[in-house]
């Protein structure tokens, strides 16, 4: 792996870890809001979590390609 690819993969991993942390926080808040009856806000948060999940898969695939683990 080139230094450039390694640097990009490292940066993407840090972004993915941050994204996972934000997802966990959103999930907790969505649960709390939903338990208090705000179903619209809860649904919006769940939708945002789904987007984070899909994007996380794409980021993980990009990291694998950069690290040449994806065949």
Image (cartoon, rainbow, N blue to C red):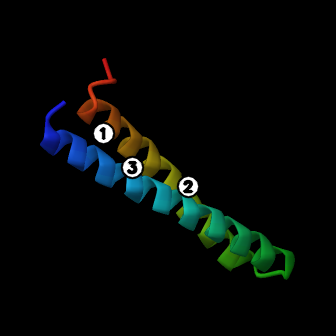
User: Can you tell which quarter of the image residue 26 is in?
Assistant: bottom right
Q: Position of residue 60 (x, y in %)?
A: 40, 40
Q: Is residue 51 visible?
A: no
Badge 3 is on which residue? 13
Name the residue rendered at 68%, 77% in the picture.
40
| Front tag of 1 and 2 | 1
Q: Position of residue 24 (x, y in %)?
A: 64, 62
What is the distance, in whole Å, between disc 3 and disc 2 at their CAs?
19 Å
The tag on residue 50 is 2
The tag on residue 62 is 1
For marks 1 and 2, the one nearer the N-term is 2
Looking at the picture, does residue 47 appear above or below residue 54?
A: below
Q: How many marks?
A: 3
Q: Residues within 10 Å of mark 2 (few under 14, many from 20)?
A: few
Looking at the picture, does residue 70 appear above or below residue 38?
A: above
Element type at marker 1?
helix
Q: Residues within 10 Å of mark 1 (few under 14, many from 20)?
A: some
| Horizontal relation, residue 17 to residue 47: left or right | left
Q: Position of residue 57 (x, y in %)?
A: 44, 42
């Amino acid at each position: 792996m080139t230094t450039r690819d390694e640097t990009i993969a490292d940066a993407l991993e840090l972004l993915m870890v941050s994204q996972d942390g934000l997802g966990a926080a959103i999930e907790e808040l969505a649960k709390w809001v939903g338990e208090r009856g705000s179903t619209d806000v809860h649904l919006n948060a769940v939708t945002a979590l789904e987007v984070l999940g899909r994007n996380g898969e794409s980021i993980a695939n990009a990291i694998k390609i950069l690290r040449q683990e994806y065949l």
